[in-house]
Structures are given as structure tokens and as C-alpha cells.
Image (spheres, coloured by chain):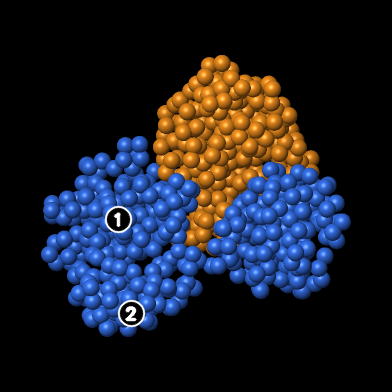
Amino acid sequence: MNIHEYQAKEILRAEGVPIPPGEVATTPEQAEAIAKKMGGMVVVKAQVHAGGRGKAGGVKLAKTPEEAKELASRILGMQIKGLTVHKVLVTSAADIASEAYVGIILDRATKKPVFMVSPAGGIDIEEVAATTPEKILKLPIDTRYGLQPYQASELGFFLFDDVKKVRAASKIMMALYQAFMKNGASLAEINPLVVTPAGDVVALDAKMVIDDNELDRHPELAALRDETAEAASEVDARNSSLTFIKLDGNVGCVVNGAGLAMATMDLVKFYGGEPANFLDIGGSSNPEKVVNALRIITADPSVKVILFNIFGGITRTDDVANGIVTATKANPLKIPIVIRLTGTNEEIAMKILQENGFSASSDMDEAVKKAVDLATKGGKAA
Amino acid sequence: MSIFIDKSTTVIVQGITGRDGGFHTKQMIEYGTRIVGGVTPGKGGQKFDDKVPVFNTVHEAVKETNANTSVIYVPPMYAADAMMEAADAGIKFIVCITEGVPVLDMTRVYPFVKEKGARLLGPNCPGLITPGESKVGIIPGRICTPGNIGVVSRSGTLTYEVVYQLTRAGMGQSTCVGIGGDPINGTNFIDCLAAFEADPKTKAVAMMGEIGGTDEQEAAEFVRKHMKKPVVGFIAGQTAPPGRRMGHAGAIISGSAGTAAEKIEAFEKAGMGVAKRPIDFVQLLKDRM
């Protein structure tokens, strides 16, 4: 789960990371009031789950509260990478002498959180890794012992020569690690970590991604989820315990299991079609999930055909068949549906479908081809 | 022969009295798996289904039953503890079915299990099956048939799909292993490929990977350097958008890394067969055997 910059900053501030003061505004008037309170120059920053906010014009410097208001009115409502800006962070501006990068990512290869630090901050770290990898220090941490002070110090010395700054940076490393572990993060990043002309080390931007699997034990983090920052269909799907990702095509896919769902999308593409979504109804046999899945998919006007691909293992195919019948009785379909079912209770499922006027196939390729045909040429319901 | 499990494997079920644990224990017993005990703290002394003894701790279960393998069906927040308990009790093969285990938990579990000398499969996996002998986990037994194809995959239902196609084509399996869809897991592709290479019964391997991480790329390198048996690979997620988690916690393209294209390229470089569709495994394997 992504959280906003202002939320990540609140978490880091609580751990003792020095961060210039700031508050969130949803209206230009609020932005003006906050700027007045901060005094001096402020930065108005779009709060969206997208990188490249600066380049998109979503981060601006304001000299006066009036200017902050004016900038906020331009940034609020702006689209950045397809996402609408609903909030801005208004924060005191800091003078910058130098910029560094500090981050922790959960690394699959070492199976550990890995610190990445670089004196080349302020730019995309992937770019630094590609062009000047010698400017990055990577340090895997054994979570059974945690970040040790000597390690934090080693990281600090990679960034600075001056001992006072090294100490300040090491303290920030310890705080960042605490925040990462306490909040079940998969990424925590300070970019840039700046040195001011006065020699202070402060965090100007912060990013955190929380492991979705941690949300059950961190209700306070689950509450940080900003549903206005996501596609409405994805919010609806999550609230219905479905894993759904919206795509640009016109073949709506309902599949059980993530691997098979991806393989089904790929097969749609293989036969010349475009998948409209990724949707995994999961392993449980609940007809209600099928009803919800159909509601979410048919709400998208670009979907021309619905393709079910169900391999019944734990999932009972008769439950899926019942779900299809229930859902289409309540809300008759306006577009064709192609059903592929095989596995647990297949015979019962086929009977239920036939009795209700549906036909179904047990072959994946056959079903996908048919769905693609219907979507591209426009055909009649099966 | 087979890999990891066979007729002699003795299994305890952690979470045997739970809904999923109970359901799948019955299925495993029906398939012929030697389920010798179960563990649910607080329910020690009971019998599951009137025949399987239930213990309070894994230590007790191991002492009484001599089980060498454990399968875990406990809720995600307790799974890390269950895996560590099994390793500490001397279980040598731990299969964790549970989906949704926090990844940071796995950063503690993985080194712990390794230091205890145990093998972990999963978490978030369907387990494994040696057709006709034993199954540990949730793979439906009736889609499998004994034979000489080794199957290894990051997915559950996609594995079933491929195994079903193989079985329909008359191509049986030595062992089918689901390594799971999480970013940090116990057993990876290379572990399975090495075991299949060493297994006299396995003649060829079908491998199903997906987007995210570099496990498939490293596996391809292993195939090129160390395997004589033919390997055919498939990658799910060619149409997946970058930066989105495709159901599995580990199925995510980060920046420009972990795409299907780079994995397929690695397969091709290693001289592996590349299945474009699940059905293609049948012909590609036939051609190579």
C-alpha cells in the first residue's frame, strides 16, 4: 500500500527524523493559512501516488501566502500520470547546500531489508544505479539483530566527511530503520536528505510503501489508505475481497488464482485481444464473490465480453456457476459471456449453467479464442 | 523416485482443527499421504476425524510420531511462529500453505529455518505432490498421474492447468512442486531444478514462472550450466502493467526489472524451450524427450 509523502513524514518525524514543518491542505484557502503560519518561503507539493511530481509541475515554491494560495489552486485538481491531485502539502522551504539519498528496500535476492545510500541525491536512484553504481553503498540488515550503530556510522561516512554530519546522518539511519520495521514497510526512502548552508541534515521528501500483508496487525496504517487516490473500481473490488487491476482492453476476465489470471490475460493477448483487467476471485467458494466480480467488470463501458476461466481446486466450480446465475438474474447482462470451467464439481456446474441457458467449455484456449472473437468482431451472446 | 516427498514421508498438520487445515487433511489422507498427527495449541489429546492424534506443540508431535514433514495451515499472523516452531522441533521439511504472511516476518524465519537444517517450501504455495504416492498441501490429486515430468511453479491454479494438460496428453509427473508467489520464500526454482536433475525418475522439467524478481533468470543460468535434462519454461504476466502487484505479493515489476520479456530472454539464452501458452508444454516436452 502506498502512503502519501505527508503521512510518511509524520511517521518519520515521530521516530526523530528532522523534517521541516508542514501541513496538508485540500483548498487554496487552507494552503494560504498554512503558509502564513509557517512564515517565509514555502513549498506547495502535490500529494499523489506517482513519481515525477516535480517534472509534472506538482511541486512549486511560494514566496508569500498569496502565492501559495495561487499555486495550490493550480495544483489541486491537476492530473499527474492519470491521478487527480486532491491534497497538497505546504511545507517550509529549506536552503540546500548538498543532497543525498537514503533508502531501505526489502530485497528478494538477499531476503533482507537492504540500506541504499548515495551522496548523489535528489534524482531517481535507479538512474544513479545505472550510470554511477560506485556512488551507491548497499548494506543488507539481519532483522534478527537490527541495524547496529557501527553500520549506521558506516552508512553516514559514505555520505559525509564531516563527523558532525556523519553523526546526524547515522541518527537518521537508525530512525528510518525503526520506522521501516515498526510499520511493516517494504520501502522507506528519504530523497533528498539535504545539508543546509548552516550544516543541518534534514529530510525534504519521504516515501513509504507498506506491505499489504501487515495491514491486519496495523489498523492505524490501514486507516492511512487514501481511496480518492485510487481507481473507484479497484476500491470497490478490495472492499469485496477481490484482487482487481484495471487495464485498457475490452475483454473482462474473471479467474481464480493469480498465476492463472495472468496467464489468461496473456492468452487473450496471444489470440489478438486486449484484457480489460486482472481479476482473481481467490480460492474460496463463495458465490457472492462472483456476483461482485460481475458488477465491477460490467461497470466499465469499454468491456465488450466477459471471460470466466475457472480451474476448480479448492474453488468449487458449482459455486461459481451459481454465482453467475444469481448475478445475471438480478442484473441481466448486456454483453456476451464466455465460460470455461473445469475441476471440482464440474458436472454439477455444467448442469446448472445449461439449465439456465448458458453454455460452457472445459478448454482454456477454446474459450479465450471465442471471447476475443466476440470482443473484436462483435458477436452474439453464447 | 521423486523429489522431496514419497510413500515413506510422515506428515503432521499444523492447524489441523481449522477449516482449511481440516478439509485438506481429509483430502491428503484420502490420497494416501501418511498423516501421523496434527497440532493445535489447546486441543492436545483430541483426535481429528476419530483417528489422527492432535498435540499442543510440534515438539510433542515429533516426539510421539517421528514425523519428518509438516504442513502449515495457520492464519498469516501466526505462520512465522509456526514455521519456526516446526524447524526448532526437528522437522526437516516444512510446507507453508498460508497466504498473506508479512514479508518482514520471513526475513527472520528464513535464516532461522536454514540454521536448523530444514527445508521450507512456501509460504503462499499449494504444496507438492508425488502422484500415486503422497501429497502435502492442496494440489488436487485427481488431475495428476504418475510419470516422469518434473513440474515446478510459482503459482497454484496455473500449475493445475499445466498438469491437467500434461495428464490429458498422457504425460505423467514425477513430482509437482508449487514454490509460492511471495517475494521471500524458502525453496526456489534452482533448489527444485537441482533435485529434478538428481532424480533418476524425472526425464524432463516443466517450469512456470511469473513477473517480479530474478529467480527465473538465475534458474535459467543454472539450467545452462548444470542441467542435462530438458527444461521448458513459461512466464505469466506478459500483459501485466509495471508497478502493480498482480495478486501474488511477489508478482510485481519494479521499475524496469522483473519483466516477462527479460525472463523469456534468459530462458532462450539458456537453450530452454519457451511455452507461449500453457498448452504448448505438451509438444515442447515431447520434442525434447
Viewer-closest of B121 and A185: A185
Q: In the displayed image of the protein, which residue is found farthest to the top?
A: B64
Q: Position of residue A245 (x, y in %)?
A: 57, 62
Q: Secondary structure at mark 1?
A: helix
Residue B144's label in the rendered image is: none
Residue tagged 1: A12
Task: Read off the chain for label 1.
Answer: A
Amino acid beneath label 1: Leu
| CA gap, disc 1 and disc 2 | 27 Å
Residue tagged 2: A29
Q: Position of residue B162 (x, y in %)?
A: 70, 46
Locate the C terminus of chain A and report the quarter of the image it occupies: bottom right
Figure disc tally: 2
Q: Which numbered disc flags the more N-terminal residue, 1 or 2?
A: 1
Q: In the rendering, what colour is chain A?
A: blue
**On the image, which quarter does residue B125 sit in?**
top right
Residue B94 seen by the camera: yes
Q: Position of residue B118 (x, y in %)?
A: 49, 28
Residue depicted at 31% across the width and 60% down the height? A9
Viewer-closest of A298 and B42: B42
Q: In the displayed image of the protein, which residue is found farthest to the right?
A: A355
